[in-house]
Image: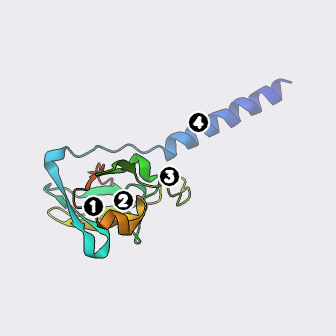
Amino acid sequence: MRAIGMARVAGLAAAVLLAGACAQTSTRATPDRYALQVVDNAADQRFDLALQSHDTLPLCVAVESWPSRVGQLHMGSNLATLQTAAGSLPARDENFGYCPGGCGEHRIEPGGTLRGFIAYDAFGDASQLAADADKRLQFSVMPHYCRR
């Protein structure tokens, strides 16, 4: 009985150590260290994004926190909202899967710019949204200092 108890304790200790090894901490950059520019590109039915670093150290953004190559957002309702004449529309929640330890990072060198876009169809009918001249995108991005 004692051997089983010791095995459980050892297994639990290994799980705790493994979880600690996977846990990564990062320091967020303060808002004065970067600027996000959003341009409404109605012709291409999307919002063009440019995240520029004003820092002397590299900044990173988790892949899960930045639009995909086709302008969609992983768990988008947590990241973006579109204010329209008809009201507020959260971005559709896409699920790009799970990556233990994260799916990687976009690196922005000092003074550099990360570019991307969010497609109108992430919020609904792209044609209808293109006709709304008063729409405003609210996109939450929080760069952090790269670990390496």
Question: Where does the image place residue 10, in percent across and percent down from the top left?
Answer: 69, 34
97 relative position to 75: left or right: right
Question: Where does the image place residue 64, in percent across and percent down from the top left?
Answer: 43, 56
Secondary structure state at the residue bearing disc 2: loop
Q: Would you say residue 96 is visible in this rendering? A: yes
Q: CA distance from mark 2 to mark 1?
A: 24 Å
Q: Earlier in the sequence, mark 2 or mark 4?
A: 4
Q: CA distance from mark 3 to mark 1?
A: 40 Å
Q: Which residue is mark 2?
A: 66
Q: Which residue is mark 1?
A: 132
Q: Residues within 10 Å of mark 3 (few under 14, many from 20)?
A: few
Q: CA distance from mark 3 to mark 2?
A: 17 Å
Q: CA distance from mark 2 to mark 4?
A: 30 Å
Q: Would you say residue 116 is visible in this rendering? A: no
Inspect the image, locate mark 1, and give the three-letter code of the amino acid beneath it. Answer: Asp
What is the number of the mark on residue 101? 3
Viewer-nearest of discs 1 and 4 = 1
Which residue is painted at 82% across and 30% down in the image? 4
CB atoms at circles 2 and 1 under 8 Å apart?
no
Secondary structure state at the residue bearing disc 1: loop
Which residue is more in the foreground, 14 or 72? 72
Question: Where does the image place residue 137, in percent across and percent down from the top left?
Answer: 27, 54
Q: Which residue is mark 4?
A: 16
Secondary structure state at the residue bearing disc 3: loop
**Image quarter of the N terminus:** top right
Q: CA distance from mark 1 to mark 4?
A: 52 Å
CB atoms at circles 3 and 1 under 8 Å apart?
no
Q: CA distance from mark 4 to mark 3?
A: 15 Å
